[in-house]
Image (cartoon, grey):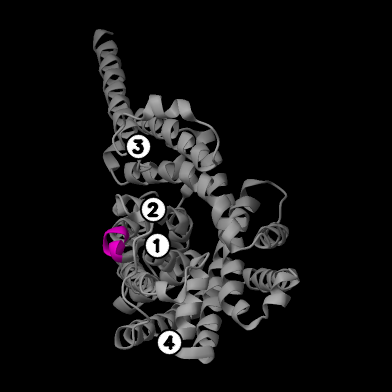
Amino acid sequence: MGNLKSKDTISIGLMLLALFFGAGNMIFPPALGQAAGSNLWSAMTGFIVTAVGLPLLGVIAIALTGGNLQKMAQKVHPWFGIAFTVAVYIVIGPLFGAPRTASVAFEMGALPFISESLHSAGWPLLVYSLIFFTITYYLSLNPSKLVDRIGKILTPLLLVIIATLLVKSILNPVGGLGSVTEAYQENPFFKGFMDGYLTMDTLGALVFGIVAIRAIRERGAKDEKSLISVTVKAGLVAAIGLTLVYLTLSYLGATSQSLGMSENGGQILTSVVLELFGTPGALLLGIAVTLACLTTSVGLVTSSSLYFSGLIPGLSYKKTAAALCIAAMAVANMGLTQIIAVSVPVLTALYPLAIVLILLNLFPMLQEMREVYVFALIGTALVSIVDGLKALQLSVSWAESLYGWLPLYSEGIGWLLPAILGALFGYGLYRLKSYNALTRRESM
């Protein structure tokens, strides 16, 4: 039993798409589109690299390591393996990922139908998030059936709704491509590349990839070759779906400037749908998005709870899930715009480390070369952490003189050259150690 049927592969791909297809996937493409205006396609190319290409590579990298994130990260060092994995689960779980699902669901599923005076009171979001995470906790106690049904039913429904939006926007456009805002006037590709960080899908891939691998094994793939092959195919199904969704939503955002500039992508998409379909359309989209966000929330809470309850002896899964839901509910009440703002510095520092770790794990010949991992990650961290501090708006003027010469530093990708140089130095060090060890053995 090694080969899965095509329908099983597609089903797993849709399940993977359902897990990814949550808050960030709905709100950031419209926001990018509205801000990029006529520079939309250049910016979206960069966005797709980090929001589709890298998550696909992340799923493949996890498959190559047997579906174990900590095992993948501990190639740097055992302690780094734990620290990095904990950081990923905290970021995509209670800190940003899970709270954002509730905030987006509220912005698109409830806020359009709440009066301004009621919303300003603050308690509607509190009540909504309490109900949202109560349901998340209940479903996280037995998530397997939900995720399978979502993959087969809700994801296709959402794709149909988004396709309908695209057709309607082409036949009856809200407006033309808008003007380019300042942030996207120069190097829109790299601005889009950095915007892709905000989806958190590359970090999510390191967790959702594990869920996909378990599903593949349950369906009969036993040997490593079959596992990797099906994972790649399922990942491609999800990647194609995400790309089509992103292009559509970003186009809707780019044509929405005539409706006024909005604070976040949730407000943009709601405004466009109200313009195109009126209140019934906004209601249907709100329900679908709420269910999609709920699915992602269950996936994040389930994965995080499984990891932390396994990491800490004596900590039960149920208690962990309850604690994560409470923490996520508290953060969700910051509001969507504030959650996005706070997440930027953390993701700016953490994302490059995840990217380099994923890329290294795609090359089997490097698996035993710890020096390559160590120095590549050190080179990356020296720049990405400073970039994170800059995003936090802390004074790091010294960094300009120290790192300003690096290629793409002003675009936020200055960590790339240090990562490459670090990997090359580590490779040279590994070869030198191997040569010295061989020389000693021959002299004995």
Q: Which residue is mark 4?
A: 276
Q: Amino acid at mark 3?
A: Tyr
User: Between marks 3 and 4, how big is the CA–CA gap?
Assistant: 41 Å
Q: Residue at x 72, y 74 (%)?
A: 124
- For marks 4 and 2, the one nearer the N-term is 2
Q: Residue at x 50, y 68 (%)?
A: 262
Contact, mark 3 vs mark 2 (Cβ under 8 Å): no
SS for callout 3: loop
Q: Which residue is mark 1?
A: 35
Q: Which residue is mark 2?
A: 183
Task: Residue 415 in the image: state x and y as whole percent.
Answer: 36, 36
Q: Amino acid at mark 1?
A: Ala
Question: For mark 3, does the 10 Å Cα neighbourhood hold few (<14), some (14 to 19), or many (20 or more) residues?
Answer: some
Q: Amino acid at mark 2?
A: Ala
User: Between marks 1 and 2, how big is the CA–CA gap?
Assistant: 8 Å
SS for callout 4: helix
Q: Main secondary structure of the magenta part?
A: helix
> Is residue 69 toward the left or the right of residue 186 in the image?
right
* Magenta span of residues: 38-43
- For marks 1 and 4, the one nearer the N-term is 1
Q: Is residue 218 visible?
A: no
Q: Which residue is mark 3?
A: 409
Q: Residue at x 55, y 59 (%)?
A: 97
SS for callout 2: helix
- Front-lying residue, 181 or 378: 181
Vertical placement of 341 versus 385: above or below? below
Contact, mark 1 vs mark 2 (Cβ under 8 Å): yes
